Image (cartoon, rainbow, N blue to C red):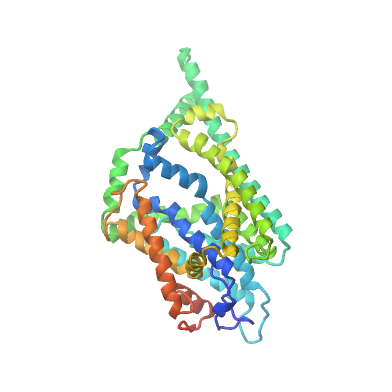
């Protein structure tokens, strides 16, 4: 995420602005702004927002917004961010030498990531954002160090292994889900035939009934309680979030880090091939954009149309499909992410809108600051200790807030970087990494 932190020989002087790879900053800026599109429902609307969208007719502003965001952008902006995190790791290690009397390259690297883990905890438990990714990036980044010298083809192979693990786990969970459905169907058949049910059959009916209850109409009592707490003061929300955030920070790393790791390894490989540093032919970027969108968009629509929109028909869906559409999530996300990156590179090198590319680059250069700033702005705008707008906007209206934050960050980043070398949180992070205050003013 933070690019070119070290000096030419791992000293404490920041990299000169002229030496940054602008194409990487530009893609990172787009990814950073795009992440807010996916995060905004978590900030601003009650958790039952999906229910009217999957039960109402497929029309209206809310549905079209939901369909567009899910089909084209779900997971891809974080995918871009993860790719660039992997590329940034390679940049951090590139051509670094051990200097006698100074910390080792590995020590700087792991110190940097440990501080990132700390900032993730701050984002989750102080700023109170439940969807923090910094904690996960810091931990996953520690695994990348061992693979820093591998050739791109081997990094792609490792990424594909991560994809395979993710798909196998999803299918494993789906088979367990279908087994519960089959046991329920068998027990209900026996019940209709007036047979005496065994304890196992009674348990199967109880388990499936609980599943249908969870996936059915939201519990009004629980949603109202969530709404009351989210519109309360800071201490109430802090206490409310502690168990959820603790479970989330630990549970994700234990259960499903594969999607994040696969994109990081792909990012390392693509950087090695010169994809992100604008070294490939225009025809190559155009080819990958067409391949990415040609595969990713149809698969994304299939998952949305068949899986997401049939969320409430769990029984019928399980009876119909031996393989869940969600098994193909990475086959949607990876091509779409590469398609997005290729499109950005084509626009970047065309020099068609240099002012916009420069604005995106500024946002990307301050990605760490802008990411935390999104959490600060949105929690203050929606939560009770701020303006208290939680659950007061319709689904599509949340994206008016997204556009407003985008405009602010594009302008703010451009103004800030006129006078300073890097963003305020980047400065704190660098200073902590090298345990020395870094110069910040230009």
Q: Residue at x 50, y 64 (%)?
A: 29
Q: Name above or below for residue 393 compared with residue 348.
A: above
Q: Tell me the quadrant of the picture where the N terminus can be found.
A: bottom right
Query: Is 52 left or right of 392, judged from the image as shown?
Result: right
Q: Residue at x 62, y 52 (%)?
A: 289
Q: Name above or below for residue 74 compared with residue 432.
A: above
Residue 412 image position (x, y, % from top left)? 40, 70
Residue 85 seen in the current view: no
Residue 23 sits in which quadrant? bottom right
Residue 113 seen in the current view: yes
Residue 387 image position (x, y, % from top left)? 26, 59
Residue 342 image position (x, y, % from top left)? 61, 56
Residue 182 sits in which quadrant? top right
Residue 265 image position (x, y, % from top left)? 64, 59
Of residues 264 and 225, the one drawn nearer to the viewer in this rendering: 264
Query: Is 68 left or right of 109, judged from the image as shown?
Result: left
Residue found at the far top of this picture = 193
Q: Residue at x 63, y 76 (%)?
A: 105
């Amino acid at each position: 995420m933070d690019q070119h932190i070290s000096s030419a020989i791992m000293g404490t002087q920041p990299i000169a602005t002229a030496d940054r790879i602008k194409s990487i900053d530009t893609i990172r800026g787009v990814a950073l702004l795009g992440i807010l599109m996916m995060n905004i429902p978590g900030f601003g609307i009650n958790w039952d927002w999906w229910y009217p969208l999957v039960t109402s007719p497929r029309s209206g502003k809310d549905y079209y917004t939901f369909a567009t965001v899910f089909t084209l952008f779900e997971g891809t902006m974080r995918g871009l961010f993860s790719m660039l995190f992997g590329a940034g790791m390679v940049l951090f290690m590139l051509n670094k030498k051990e200097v006698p009397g100074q910390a080792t390259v590995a020590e700087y690297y792991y110190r940097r990531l440990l501080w990132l883990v700390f900032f993730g905890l701050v984002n989750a438990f102080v700023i109170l954002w439940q969807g923090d990714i910094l904690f996960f990036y810091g931990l996953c980044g520690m695994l990348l160090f061992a693979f820093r010298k591998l050739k791109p083809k081997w990094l792609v192979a490792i990424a594909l292994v991560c994809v395979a693990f993710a798909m196998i786990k999803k299918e494993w969970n789906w088979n367990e889900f279908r087994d519960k459905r089959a046991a329920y169907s068998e027990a209900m058949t026996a019940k209709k035939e007036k047979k005496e049910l065994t304890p196992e059959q009674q348990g199967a009916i109880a388990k499936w009934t609980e599943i249908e209850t969870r996936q059915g109409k939201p519990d009004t009592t629980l949603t109202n309680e969530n709404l009351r707490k989210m519109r309360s003061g800071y201490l109430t929300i802090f206490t409310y979030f502690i168990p959820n955030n603790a479970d989330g920070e630990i549970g994700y790393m234990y259960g499903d880090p594969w999607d994040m790791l696969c994109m990081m390894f792909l990012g390392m490989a693509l950087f090695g091939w010169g994809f992100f540093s604008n070294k490939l032919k225009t025809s190559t970027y155009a080819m990958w954009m067409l391949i990415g969108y040609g595969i990713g968009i149809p698969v994304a629509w299939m998952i949305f149309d068949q899986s997401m929109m049939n969320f409430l028909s769990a029984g019928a869906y399980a009876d119909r499909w031996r393989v869940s559409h969600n098994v193909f999530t990475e086959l949607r996300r990876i091509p779409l992410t590469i398609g997005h990156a290729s499109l950005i590179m084509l626009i970047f090198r065309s020099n068609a809108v240099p002012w916009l590319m420069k604005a995106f680059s500024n946002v990307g250069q301050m990605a760490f600051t802008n990411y935390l700033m999104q959490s600060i702005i949105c929690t203050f705008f929606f939560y009770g200790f701020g303006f208290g707008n939680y659950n007061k906007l319709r689904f599509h209206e949340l994206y008016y807030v997204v556009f407003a934050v985008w405009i602010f960050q594009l302008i703010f980043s451009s103004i800030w970087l006129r006078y300073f070398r890097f963003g305020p949180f980047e400065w704190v992070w660098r200073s902590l990494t090298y345990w020395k205050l870094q110069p910040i003013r230009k």
